[in-house]
Image (cartoon, rainbow, N blue to C red):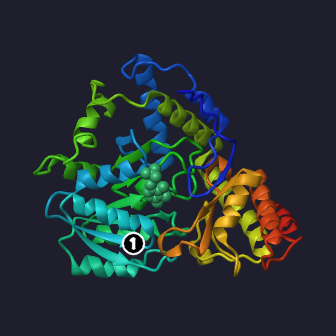
Amino acid sequence: MSITSFNPPVRTLMGPGPSDVHPRVTGAMARPCIGHLDPAFVGMMDEVKTMLQYAYQTKNQLTIPVSAPGSAGMETTFQNLLEHGDKAIIAQNGVFGGRMKEVAERCGATAIMVEDDWGKPVDPQKIEDACKAHPDAKLVAFVHAETSTGARSDAETICKIAHDHDMLTLVDAVTSIGGSELRVDDWGIDAIYSGTQKCLSCTPGISPVSFSERAIEVITSRKSRVQSWFLDTNLVMGYWGANAKRAYHHTAPVNALYALHESLVMLQDEGIENSWARHKKNHLVLRAGLEAMGLSFIVDEEHRLSQLNAVTIPEGIDEAVVRSRLLNDFNLEIGAGLGALAGKVWRIGLMGHSSRAENIFLCIAALEAVMSDMGADINTGVALSAAQNAMK
Ligand SMILES: *Cc1c(COP(=O)(O)O)cnc(C)c1O
């Protein structure tokens, strides 16, 4: 065997996640590993919980990081809230609503699907109709920021409808946290999960979740045990809970939590509203450049996410060749279309530390260079100045 150390190339990450990790975060990860029951570590855990409450704009006590990626947060929320025989109304307008169905059904629940076209937001009227048609449903679940299409749904309105029908609300905020306005308490979100690798400028592998009092009542009065031992919040709380004995449940990913802590300190220092505003402003700069080049967005302006820009591909261009040239010649990663949009769009992420001017200008210049070399029908020589104007 002659395998040597792995040294990854240095890339600029402008896909659907992971996004660029801030050097302060990778620096924090390299700090010494200590025991997950060490008093010094336990103090840091409390700070992580407090800062996650800020990131979610919630006072929920049960706001903790699950030791696994966003998909585990999805499993945690569904598995704790749903029991065999329950009904869940689930909105699907892209890839991730489909995953929610998978997960809900594996909990033994029936999924009532409410579908919208890919690229469109969830239609609140359809949610209202589904609540009326299925008054016995336990919860309404939807994706706030659909990363597969770049569409943002109106979480506040959907939650209000669900509560008017006395149902719980379960929200996927993997791509929204830190990047789009998100107010768990004001909007009445009962269960929410997100990820660290999108708009928090952190490494992948942790999923912050939060549950309202109302959701906790449902969890503590379950008739059956949560099917997953690892994700059962009743057990996890022995380690993470307020006034808990910090009893061993599983070994926390110590260094990954240093990373999350650092990224949340950065969010707190920037200010959450400023972070949302930065994502929006940078989106407008990228948009000016891409539109000047002749690319167009697939989501209506009103429902567009700042952090995920899904744009059309010029006629006759092999999109996979463009992406591989960006990667090989410019160390730049952008995302391909998923599912129904595969081969039809690029997904350009401006998430977290990736949402900054130097990334935008690299992306516009590199896309133009590669596409004009391939003979694409685009406008050349105008995109960078359009972006520059949008910065003013
Ligand atoms: C990325 C993503 C997920 C999955 O997160 P992982 O960390 O990849 O498990 C779920 N939902 C949405 C909307 C996402 O963007």
Q: Please name whichever residue, 2 or 307, is drawn nearer the observer in this view of the structure.
A: 2
Q: Is residue 317 visible?
A: yes
* Direction from residue 253 to residue 326 in the image, left or right: right
* Direction from residue 225 to residue 78 in the image, left or right: right
Residue at horizontal 87 percent and vertical 71 percent from the top: 382
Tell me if the residue at label 1 has its CB under 8 Å from ligand 1. Answer: no
Residue at horizontal 28 percent and vertical 79 percent from the top: 130
**Within 10 Å of the Cα at label 1, are there few (<14), some (14-19), or many (20+) other Cα atoms?**
many
* Residue 145 at x, y percent in the picture: 50, 63
Three-letter code, disc 1 = Gln
- The vertical placement of 291 against 45, above or below, is below
- Occupied quadrant, residue 267: top right
Q: Please name whichever residue, 77 or 343, is drawn nearer the observer in this view of the structure.
A: 343
- The vertical placement of 217 against 202, above or below, is below
* Direction from residue 58 to residue 387 in the image, left or right: right
- The vertical placement of 140 against 359, above or below, is below
